[in-house]
Image: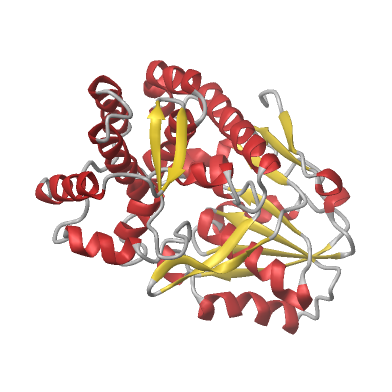
């Protein structure tokens, strides 16, 4: 028996699009109203294809459905793998009215979106995210791209999907590390925008970690609602949308240093949020009780609490210097003024930043 299907929208005027959330919608929901022509190209990976490709094809009855299967992993989020998508599109003669479909986690979603933004100067695409992190965050908002050896997500484009279809049943097949990684982004929404969500998470975390379907659906819905509101206010990250990057400046540095794929994105963001919270407390913007509350929920979620072994304060500074939020050479961070309220700023005491970096690097195992 399927649970209730819930919908919300990302309000972008004529480019408004729905987010559809439910158990069992993969393979049963007709997505052809969001397809411009007869051609559909599903982009997935070697892990997801055996599980869900056949079901995803059923979402497009009466269409010419082709597919391309990519290698799985953050280390493949690069030009070479991106070209596999273009190769498939050109070999199968997909025209400029084709629709791409991202079936997978954040890597597949980002790469498919970037391919859609650039194939024949732009074609539509649909997101079908299959990991918690991609369901609550990366599938919504139109950020697409690939990594560069010197920095994560440094090459990309804003390109909004036509629709996002989220099937909570796919979470039952996640590897163990993926669920905590996705919860990092849910925690983030509570920290930056919705203190009520943070309190709900504290009381519901055991159910979420136990894959209780109603709790997961509620976490996904509330996270997507938060993301949709922010994107509607600031589509291209000129202001408030940058607060969605809480923990990401530290986290991206961790991912780049460790080597793409060794740390999951959500794991790095979890540690990054702890570092941002610690710095916010050192600046006197939040109190020690709030900082400890942040540490407690990240710990309970099963996320790493320290950066990778061998990472130094100087290495952090080197990698954070290429963060996309930086302006005119000034390091800008997302910090907390309270639980539920974040700010993007370069106006902070850099001595406190050095203390935070030293503290966390000393804690390494």
Instruction: Indicate left or right for 38 with 49 as reference.
Output: right
Q: Where is residue 323 in the image (x, y as percent from the top left)?
A: 42, 61
Please state which of residues 239 and 138 is positioned toward the viewer in this rendering.
239
Residue 232 image-quadrant placement: top right
Residue drawn 58% across the image and 35% down it? 168
From where the camera sits, is residue 298 visible?
yes
Work out whether residue 114 or residue 32 is closer to the camera in this orientation and state it. Answer: 114
The residue drawn where x is 55% and y is 44% is 137
Say left or right for 122 vs 206: right
Q: How many marks?
A: 0
Query: Is 288 rendered above or below residue 327?
Result: above
Taking depth in this image into account, of 141 and 73 the one nearest to the observer is 141
Residue 26 showing in the rendered view: no
Above/below status of 80 relative to 40: below
> Is 299 positioned to the left or the right of 309 in the image?
right
Question: What is the quadrant of the N terminus in the image?
Answer: top right
Horizontal and vertical percent for residue 301?
33, 32
Quadrant of residue 310 in the image?
bottom left
Picture coordinates of residue 56 (x, y %)?
A: 69, 52
Q: How far across and down, in percent of the image, does residue 361 sit?
A: 15, 51
Residue drawn at x 77%, y 41% as measured from the top left: 29
């Amino acid at each position: 028996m399927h649970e209730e299907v819930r919908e919300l929208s990302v309000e972008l005027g004529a480019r408004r699009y729905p987010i559809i959330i439910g158990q069992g919608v993969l393979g049963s929901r007709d997505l052809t109203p969001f397809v411009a022509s007869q051609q559909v190209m599903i982009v997935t990976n070697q892990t997801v294809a055996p599980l869900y490709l056949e079901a995803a094809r059923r979402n497009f009855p009466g269409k010419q459905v082709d597919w391309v299967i990519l290698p799985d992993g953050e280390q493949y989020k690069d030009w070479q793998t991106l070209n596999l998508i273009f190769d498939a599109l050109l070999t199968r003669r997909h025209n400029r009215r084709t629709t791409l479909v991202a079936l997978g986690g954040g890597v597949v979603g980002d790469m498919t979106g970037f391919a859609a933004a650039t194939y024949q100067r732009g074609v539509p695409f649909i997101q079908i995210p299959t990991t918690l992190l991609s369901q609550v965050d990366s599938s919504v908002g139109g950020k697409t791209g690939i990594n560069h050896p010197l920095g994560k997500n440094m090459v990309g484009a804003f390109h909004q999907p036509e629709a996002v279809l989220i099937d909570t049943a796919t979470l039952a097949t996640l590897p163990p590390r993926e669920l905590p990684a996705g919860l990092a982004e849910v925690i983030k929404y509570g920290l930056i925008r919705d203190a009520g969500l943070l309190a709900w998470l504290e009381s519901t975390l055991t159910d979420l970690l136990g894959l209780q379907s109603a709790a997961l659906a509620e976490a996904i819905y509330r996270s997507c609602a938060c993301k949709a509101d922010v994107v509607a206010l600031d589509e291209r990250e000129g202001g408030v949308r940058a607060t969605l990057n809480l923990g990401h400046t530290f986290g991206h540095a961790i991912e780049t240093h460790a080597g793409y794929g060794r740390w999951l994105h959500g794991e790095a963001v979890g540690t990054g949020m702890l570092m941002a919270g610690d710095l916010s407390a050192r600046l006197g913007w939040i109190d020690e009780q709030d900082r400890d509350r942040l540490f407690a929920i990240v710990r309970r979620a099963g996320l790493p609490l320290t950066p990778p072994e061998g990472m130094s304060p100087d290495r952090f500074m080197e990698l954070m210097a290429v963060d996309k939020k930086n302006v005119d050479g000034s390091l800008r961070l997302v910090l907390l003024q309270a639980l539920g309220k974040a700010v993007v700023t370069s106006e902070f005491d850099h001595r406190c930043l050095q203390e935070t970096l030293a503290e966390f690097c000393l804690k390494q195992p």
